[in-house]
Amino acid sequence: MLFASWFRIAVTTLLFGLSVFQFIEGEIGNGIFALLLSLVVLITVWMSEAIIFAFLAIRKGDFVKARKRLDWIKKPDGLIKMQRAYYWYLDGLIRSQSGELSKADSSLKKALGFGLYMNHDRAMAKLNLAGIAASRRRKREALNWLAEAKKDDDKKMLADQLKMMKAQISRM
């Protein structure tokens, strides 16, 4: 993900340099086109950086700051597919921490629908969905989400959380 950001920054720089060169050569139309193209690429870098900053805030446990970072993105539908998946994933995590369970449920399902890249991110989303289903007293749905989360947790990073959730669900 970081490599992609640096690559896009390099492409933006090259396109901006090309637009300046075109303006110097007197090719105003080509210069304007290259400038607009560099701005489009720069916007994709900005959106990606907002998502990265939100991830860092969540990692520190600062969900208010993470919400502010996600709010930088006004239209998530304008993001590329992978960025959209992580936008909805982070939105779901933030909403689940703030108690907005119905909105968190729909956000996490959108994230899974767009396709999260990392297995442990899919497992975490499914674990949160299991917790939301359990809080709504939907034992079967919670167990299904838990089983899917266990499949996606190939490196056993969430093994303890999965065991605790299973114990909580079995007490229902």
Image (cartoon, grey):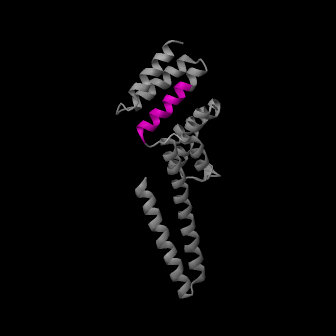
Task: Give the residue at x 43% y 57%.
Answer: 4
Magenta stretch holds residue 13: no
Quarter of the image with the C terminus in it:
top right
> x and y percent of residue 30 in the render?
56, 78
Out of 38 and 51, give the one closest to the viewer: 51
Magenta stretch holds residue 129: yes
- How many numbered marks appear? 0
Residue 160 visible in rendering: yes
> x and y percent of residue 75 in the render?
64, 51
**Magenta-highlighted residues:** 118-131
> x and y percent of residue 77 in the render?
61, 49
Q: Is residue 50 above or below residue 37?
A: above
Residue 115 visible in rendering: no
**Extreme-top residue of the structure:** 171
Out of 127 and 22, give the one closest to the viewer: 127
Q: Is residue 12 above or below residue 53?
A: below
Q: Residue 149 appears in which quarter of the rendering? A: top left
Magenta stretch, overall SS: helix
> x and y percent of residue 94 in the render?
58, 38
Give the left or right position of residue 43, taking residue 120 as reference: right
Task: Give the residue at x 51% y 12%.
Answer: 171
Q: Residue 156 appears in which quarter of the rendering? A: top left
Task: Give the residue at x 42% y 21%.
Answer: 163
Task: Give the residue at x 56% y 20%.
Answer: 134
Give the left or right position of residue 2, taking residue 43 as reference: left
**Extreme-left residue of the structure:** 155
